[in-house]
Image (cartoon, rainbow, N blue to C red):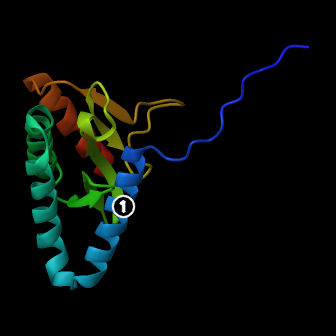
Amino acid sequence: MSSTATTAYEGFTAEERAAMKDHAKELKTTARRSEAEKAAEAVRDVLAKIAEMKDEDRALAERVHAIITASAPALAPKLWYGMPAYALNGKLVCHFQPAEKFKSRYATLGFSDPAKLDDGAMWAVSYALTEITPEVEARISALVKQAVS
């Protein structure tokens, strides 16, 4: 009879716990704001979070933010689990995940269910980012426009 090693559930990683704490803090902060303050404060929160990022992530996040806000002005910037995100009518459409956030190899631009990226029976909803070239900028712009169309 052979024995198989079983791994016990260790719980959430430190990074996951930090992201959940960020999200709880975001919800509390948002609940305290008046409707008039929310949009302006959300933009400031996103820009402040981007400013806190390490060099490579910050450079990518700044460009992604500029591309999204120029390409789809209907999207409202907000924080989502401590990451810059963009919502339409209160529903998250896309977000930027810095590589440092979960110690991954690259940053990502992810899209949520409300994004209208459907293309047949299978399509990408997350894109790895290592640099923003003119081609990448055009692709992000096209994806964001399609997501809100």
Q: Secondary structure at mark 1?
A: helix
At x 39%, y 46%, the residue is: 14
Question: In this image, 125 relative to 82: left or right?
Answer: right
> Residue 15's spot in the image, x, y percent?
37, 45
- Among the 4 quarters of the image, the one containing residue 57: top left
Please, is residue 12 above or below residue 86 in the view? above
User: Among all residues in the image, which is located at the extreme right?
Assistant: 1
Q: Amino acid at mark 1?
A: Lys
Q: Is residue 149 visible?
A: no
Taking depth in this image into account, of 18 and 28 the one nearest to the observer is 18
Question: In this image, 11 relative to 30: left or right?
Answer: right
**Crowd band around label 1 with a 10 angstrom C-alpha radius: few (<14), some (14–19), many (20+):** some
At x 62%, y 41%, the residue is: 9
At x 22%, y 82%, the residue is: 33
Q: Quadrant of the N terminus?
A: top right
Identify the residue position indicated by label 1 in the image: 21
Please, is residue 61 above or below residue 20 in the view? above
Q: Is residue 111 visible?
A: yes
> Residue 115's spot in the image, x, y percent?
37, 48
Taking depth in this image into account, of 129 and 91 the one nearest to the observer is 129
